[in-house]
Image (cartoon, grey):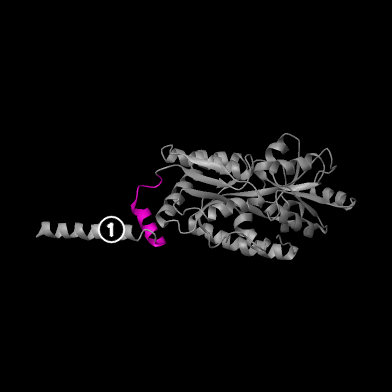
Amino acid sequence: MTTALAAGARRHALIAVIMLIGLGGMPWASQALAQVGPTYPSRPVRLVVGFPAGSGPDIVARLLAQKLSEGWSNLGVVVDNKPGAAGLIAASEVARAQPDGYTLMLGETGQLAIASSSYSKLPYDPKKDFVPVSQVVTSNFMLVVNPAKVPVHDVRQFVAWSRTQKSLFMGTFGAGTPGHFGAFLFGDAVGLKPEPVHYKTTGDALGGLFGADVAGSFASVGLAAANVKAGKLLALASSGDARSASLPDVPTFREQGYPQLAFNSWFGIVAPARTPPAVVARLEADIRKAVQSAEGKARLEEAGFGVTGTTAREFAHIIDADTVKWGKVVAATGFKAD
């Protein structure tokens, strides 16, 4: 009797597998098959970054890719830079990728929480086309100027100097990015009307500062730190609640009397919608382990980032809350990109 029952159980299992294979074209069936397939990951994973090599997101992506690869027996995580349109090109591509866990994106605030308010026609839906996996880091901003061109040493001097100029041109790293709207927040706080100058790449934006084409810019701490330490740029203030460990001598806006200028951005991993929950759970656990490890955390903090490593649920709440917060800022500026 025991043998007969075992045989029957095997027949039922075989029938179930055949049904799943026969229904493999159905989305939910594909997910089921993915979960009972080979242990994830079984081949290299592509991590798409919507910004060029050397940018803040790229630095984070490469550090994370190395730590994940080590944890996956050096299977390989390939960082694929797809710069352009403030990250929208990369987000559009990943939104259409196979939801199998082998194409991921290091997304940032602009792509996932601001774009839906700032673009009238967005080629993807941040809410519907992605599943959050884990917020990796946060990034504060520095208001930086070229000390050889702008004769100031703090925010109040910069404001006073700006009032003597015909226009206040502020460089941004792309329309619709946190730094872009940070310039508007700054203008509102000090009673000025900045004219944003949008650059396509990080290098172009820095070139605008070095060449005095713009008076200042809101640059991430990770990007600004090396240039500030080298004396090429002067950091007037940090947008964080506390001073940056990378640039501890730079006071916050709050310390200088501008508490309304406390804001930041973040980078986190998202996967295409309908990625199997089991794969998302594995990614979440491995990413958190990678960034919260002693080495991973130290390297990210040294690069100027605040390490978080949240759960998928926490990251989803962060995206939702920031979508509302930045939506109000966008609406107040009246900005709308085509």
- Residue type for callout 1: Ile
Residue 10, how many percent across, how many down?
20, 57
Q: Front-most of 267 and 79?
A: 79
**Is residue 73 rendered magenta in the image?**
no
x 78%, y 42%: residue: 209
Residue 233, how many percent across, how many down?
76, 39
Task: Specify the principal SS of the magenta part.
Answer: helix
x 75%, y 64%: residue: 334
Give the left or right position of residue 70, taking residue 219 as reference: left
Q: Name the residue under label 1.
A: 18
Q: Quadrant of the N terminus?
A: bottom left
Q: Quadrant of residue 145?
A: top right
Vertical order, 231 against 184 (above or below): above
Residue 149, how many percent across, how many down?
84, 40
Report the label total: 1
**Would you say residue 261 is visible in this rendering?**
yes
Q: Quadrant of residue 205?
A: top right
Question: What element does badge 1 sit on?
Answer: helix
Give the left or right position of residue 151, taking residue 97 as reference: right
Give the left or right position of residue 149, taking residue 36 as reference: right
Q: Give the range drawn in magenta.
A: 26-41
Give the left or right position of residue 221, taking residue 97 as reference: right
Vertical order, 324 against 100 (above or below): below
Q: In which quarter of the image is residue 111?
A: bottom right
